[in-house]
Image (cartoon, rainbow, N blue to C red):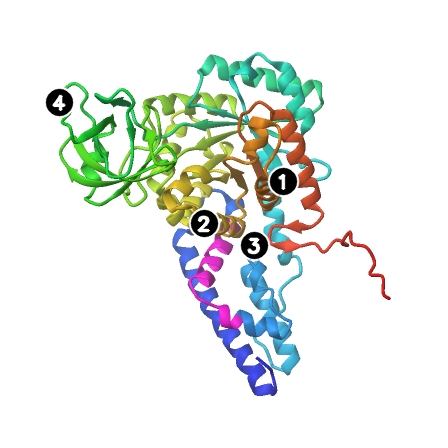
Amino acid sequence: MTYSSIEEQTQIYDDLTELYQQIKAESETEFKAIDKYIERNEFRESARNLFAYLALRRRDIRSLQADLSSWGLSSLGRLESRTLFTLESVIRRLGNTIGKDMEIEEPESKQSTAGRNRLAQNTQLFFGDAPRERNTRIMVTMPTEASEDKVLLKELIESGMNVARINAAHDNEDTWSAMIDNIHEVAEELDKKVKILIDIAGPKIRTDWVFTKFKKPKVKAGDLVRMTKDYVNLPALDDDIKVTIGCSIPQIFEQLSIDDPILIDDGSIELEVKKIGESEALLLVKRVRGGSVRIKAEKGLNFPKTEFDIDVLTDEDRKAIHFAVEHADMIGCSFIRTTDDIEEIQAEIEKMNRPLNDIPLTLKIETVQAMNNLPEVILKAGSRNPVSVMIARGDLAVESGYVRLAELQQEILWICEASDTPVIWGTEVMASMLDEGIPSRAEVTDAAEGSRSECVMLNKGSYMSDTVQMLNDILIKMEEHQYKKTPTLRSLNVAKIKLP
């Protein structure tokens, strides 16, 4: 749009002012409704800004953004951590340009960095001091060998590991204790500090067992699969049923619907519900990766369109939480879906008579339901506990579809920045290098994108220390170019053009 008159410029000013007034009124009303429930004073301004950001993003402001950009005034695309401040600043610049008498006061300059400073403090709490040349920390999942192999731990810490993740779905308390003791001992020898995250397993739904009359129980599109919770009274297999799989969680069968999609083994097998009984369901195979795949026990089951009412904690999880409260710096909460899940975890921690403000929680976002409820669960957790978020992209991709994953992980980053919540970029980061010693081009790009988070997580593999070192180098390089969504505009390494 070409601005040819003061009238057109004034219209943009009026539109932006009206938007600001709506955002401020809505967000203040919503904030006041929960303010009394916020026990952590340090979270109060984070919550206030989150409400303002959400009020703005409920609206489609693309045309206004385009108009402002054409005038060279817009910074609305980078207002996550300073929503009202940004709107106030742009309105003031517009008003000064057109000579408008303004009711909106000039915001204090310190407000522009207040959210960023809160995020930095929260990041330090969760992941420790920033290394000298990068702000994004590195988390590494501990293999069982870490309970004995101090040389490996020394290599990982020297290469750049800042946080050690212990997966409570594997090993036991004795092994976890040995890992933690070794990590602390080696870190102290190296004059380093390494934070400990204990990741609680949560209600991961899996194939408990597999039964078939065929020697090689591979399935292909068009095959029928029975899913049941009852192994004792397993009905005789008829010729139409290729494989029977066990799933012992009764709520699955109570809450499924006809035509619901089901995915097995990270989406390798896509099925659809055709019939439902009290203790079983008949499934039709729709698609299979590679044409045919063998269904195995202990593989993940995902239900993209089904929202289950399942307890977020098993008995084993409750024991692991008690261990984590005593031995870890933060607790990873798997398969968070609703605020009820947060309350259940907080109630378990309170049984140990520990202040919730002393127990940082990492919320793993791995379902579409959790994504849809993300602002609510952040507010619920952050009101009583320090809170961070892990983008668990494996399960999230299976549930949402790989195309939508790209959108969702950006939305998580935006919402978390608006609430000053540190983010962990997880799942399959540099997976090829971990396993084979050489990364793919796409993995390097993915790791660079992870620099927009506060921490990048690596899994276990044969080349762990080499991968940590390469990730460290990538993050240092990206630190020179970008913070979150904002380019830092470091000088480019390009040759001077030689004119003829």
Q: Which residues are magenta?
A: 44-64
Look at mark 4 in the image and give the residue it sits on: 236
Q: Quadrant of the C terminus?
A: bottom right
- Crowding at dot 1, Cα within 10 Å, few <14 / some 14-19 / many 20+, comes out as many
Q: Which secondary structure lies at badge 3? A: loop
User: What is the number of the mark on residue 136?
Assistant: 1
In this rendered view, identify the residue nearer to me: 314 or 232.
232
Amino acid type at circle 4 is Ala
Q: Amino acid at mark 1?
A: Thr
Distance Cα–Cα, label 2 vs label 1: 20 Å
The structure residue drawn at horizontal position 38% and vertical position 49%, both measured from the top left corner, is 372
Given residues 367 and 265, the one toward you in this image is 265
Q: Are marks 1 and 3 in contact (CB under 8 Å)?
A: no
| First in residue order: circle 4 vs circle 1 | 1
Q: Main secondary structure of the magenta part?
A: helix
Q: Secondary structure at mark 1?
A: loop
Of tags 1 and 3, the one toward the viewer is: 1
In contact (CB < 8 Å): disc 4 and disc 1: no
Please give the name of the residue rendered at 64% of the width and 35% of the height, measured from the top-left corner: 471
Q: How much space separates mark 4 and mark 1, taking CA atoms?
A: 56 Å
Reading the chain from its start, which is encountered first: label 1 or label 3? 3
Q: Using the numbered discs, state the Cα–Cα distance from disc 4 to disc 3 in whole angstroms.
A: 60 Å
Examine the structure image and report whether residue 329 is included in the region drawn in magenta.
Answer: no
- Residue carrying label 2: 408
Q: Measure the C-alpha gap from mark 2 to mark 3.
A: 19 Å
Q: Which residue is mark 3?
A: 81
Q: State how far apart marks 2 and 4 are (Cα).
A: 44 Å
In primary-sequence order, the first of circles 4 and 3 is 3
Q: Is residue 354 left or right of residue 204?
A: right
Instruction: Tell me if mark 2 has few (under 14), some (14-19) or many (20+) residues whose alpha carbon lies within 10 angstroms of its own.
Output: many
Q: Amino acid at mark 2?
A: Leu
* 45, 494: nearer the viewer: 494
